């Protein structure tokens, strides 16, 4: 978790946290981090922060990033079938466990970030980092995508993912 004073930020690895950090850096807002940094969930202490902010990304995108990070020898669809068989709903549980007051969807960048910066009083945030790291994965297997979204209903409902 990063504490910026008036607000705190944290999100799961692979959801856009490093992008958020890079976007905030030029603003020069002083901050402190907890052990585990940007990816550790919020603590019980707000330390005066009025708002807790997090980022989310589409469940299929997040699962693809996990697949890439693990460097698995099987194909992505096999990985997804394994996920559905063994841990359905885990992505929703992870993202919802952060219990932020406000969430920004990676797919809504950079516009959501401009609006957030304006909300916290920075009308001219300057140039934001490229959003290529926040790319969305389009799963072509419609049946499999439907099964993922059914398993991640909590996330679909909370963040308007379909």
Image: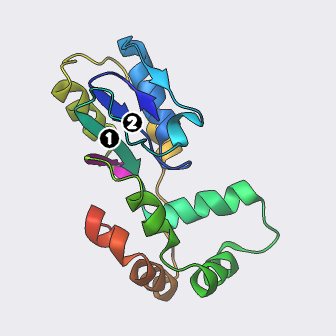
In the image, residue 75 sits, relative to residue 120, either above or below, namely below
Q: What secondary structure is found at the residue carrying circle 1?
A: strand
Categorize mark 2 by other alpha carbons within 10 Å: few (<14), some (14-19), many (20+).
many
Q: Quadrant of residue 129?
A: top left
Residue at the image point whose x is 42% and y is 62% from the top: 58
- Name the disc covering residue 9, or none: 2
Residue in the foreground of this view, choosing between 74 and 24: 24
Q: Quadrant of residue 23?
A: top left
- Name the disc covering residue 53, or none: 1
Pointers 1 and 2 in contact (C-beta within 8 Å): yes
Q: What secondary structure is found at the residue carrying circle 2?
A: strand
Q: How many circles with numbers are drawn on the protein?
A: 2
Please indicate, yes or no, whether residue 113 appears anywhere in the rendered image. yes
Q: What's drawn in magenta, residue-wise?
A: 102-107
Tell me the quadrant of the picture where the C terminus can be found.
Answer: bottom left
Residue at the image point whose x is 53% and y is 43% from the top: 40
Please indicate, yes or no, whether residue 162 appears anywhere in the rendered image. no
- Name the disc covering residue 45, or none: none
Give the colour scheme shown.
rainbow
Lower sequence index among marks 1 and 2: 2
- Does residue 7 appear to the left or right of 65 in the view shown? left
């Amino acid at each position: 978790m990063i504490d910026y004073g008036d607000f705190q930020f944290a999100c799961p690895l692979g959801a856009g946290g490093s992008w958020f950090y890079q976007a905030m850096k030029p603003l020069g807002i002083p901050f402190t981090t907890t052990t585990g940094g940007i990816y550790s969930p919020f603590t019980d202490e707000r330390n005066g922060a009025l708002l807790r902010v997090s980022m989310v990304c589409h469940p299929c995108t997040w699962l693809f990033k996990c697949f890439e990070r693990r460097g698995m020898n099987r194909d992505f669809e096999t990985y997804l079938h394994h996920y559905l068989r063994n841990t359905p709903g885990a992505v929703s549980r992870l993202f919802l466990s952060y219990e932020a007051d406000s969430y920004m969807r990676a797919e809504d960048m950079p516009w959501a970030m401009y609006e957030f910066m304006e909300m916290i009083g920075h009308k001219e945030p300057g140039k934001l980092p490229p959003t290529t790291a926040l790319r969305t994965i389009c799963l072509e297997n419609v049946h499999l995508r439907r099964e993922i979204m059914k398993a991640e209903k909590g996330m679909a409902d909370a963040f308007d993912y379909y």
